[in-house]
């Protein structure tokens, strides 16, 4: 431990991130989706007619990986592909009604899970934590 406590803070932050990732994986089990598939579905639902290259960029993954994620979501009937009217070589991704329904269910479950996890803290501490994390993220 450094005398200023920075090592412990970093370790604690990583532990909390691992807890959050584990909880997210467990939360997704009823829908049989991986976290990467759920994040991709969220991106596609947030901005209809999403190009594969934009999906890859938003998820910070290789274009080939974005194609694999899109394939899996399309196979499940959660998204559909369509030609880009502005570029015949490009493909656009759009959420299906089923994809939007599942995305809404996941979002509601995640909101409830976060409320349960962060509800362990008094409201003032939650506000302080949010302010601190925003400062560190910027």
Image (tube, rainbow, N blue to C red):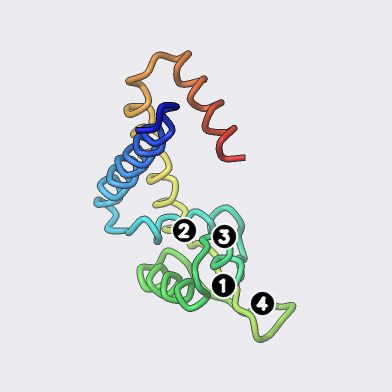
The residue that disc 1 covers is: 52
Helix, strand or loop under label 2: helix
Which callout, 3 or 2, points at the residue further toward the start of the chain?
A: 2
Which callout, 4 or 1, points at the residue further toward the start of the chain?
A: 1
Which callout, 4 or 2, points at the residue further toward the start of the chain?
A: 2
Which residue ends up furthest to the front in the rendered image? 3
Q: Residues within 10 Å of mark 1 (few under 14, many from 20)?
A: many
For discs 3 and 2, the disc positioned in front in the rendered view:
3
Tag of residue 58: 3
As drawn, 131 above or below 41: above
For discs 4 and 1, the disc positioned in front in the rendered view:
1
Which quadrant would residue 84 be assigned to in this image? bottom right
Is the C terminus in the top left, top right, bottom left or bottom right quadrant?
A: top right
The residue that disc 2 covers is: 41
For discs 1 and 3, the disc positioned in front in the rendered view:
3
Q: Exactly how many numbered labels are in the figure?
A: 4
Residue 47 locus on image (x, y percent):
61, 57
Mark 4–mark 1 Cα distance, whole angstroms, equals 11 Å
Residue 72 locus on image (x, y percent):
37, 71
Nearest the eye: 118 or 113: 118
Which quadrant would residue 92 be assigned to in this image? bottom right
The residue that disc 4 covers is: 84
């Amino acid at each position: 431990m450094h005398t200023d406590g920075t090592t412990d803070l970093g370790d604690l932050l990583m532990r909390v991130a691992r807890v959050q990732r584990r909880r997210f994986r467990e939360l997704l089990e009823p829908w049989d989706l991986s976290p990467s598939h759920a994040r991709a579905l969220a991106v596609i639902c947030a901005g209809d007619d999403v190009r594969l290259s934009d999906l890859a960029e938003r998820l910070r993954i290789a274009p080939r990986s974005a194609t694999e994620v899109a394939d899996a979501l399309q196979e499940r009937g959660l998204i559909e592909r369509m030609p880009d009217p502005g570029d015949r070589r490009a493909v656009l991704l759009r959420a299906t009604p089923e994809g939007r329904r599942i995305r809404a269910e996941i979002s509601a479950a995640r909101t409830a899970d976060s409320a349960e996890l962060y509800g362990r803290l008094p409201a003032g501490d939650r506000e302080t934590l949010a302010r601190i994390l925003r400062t560190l993220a910027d």
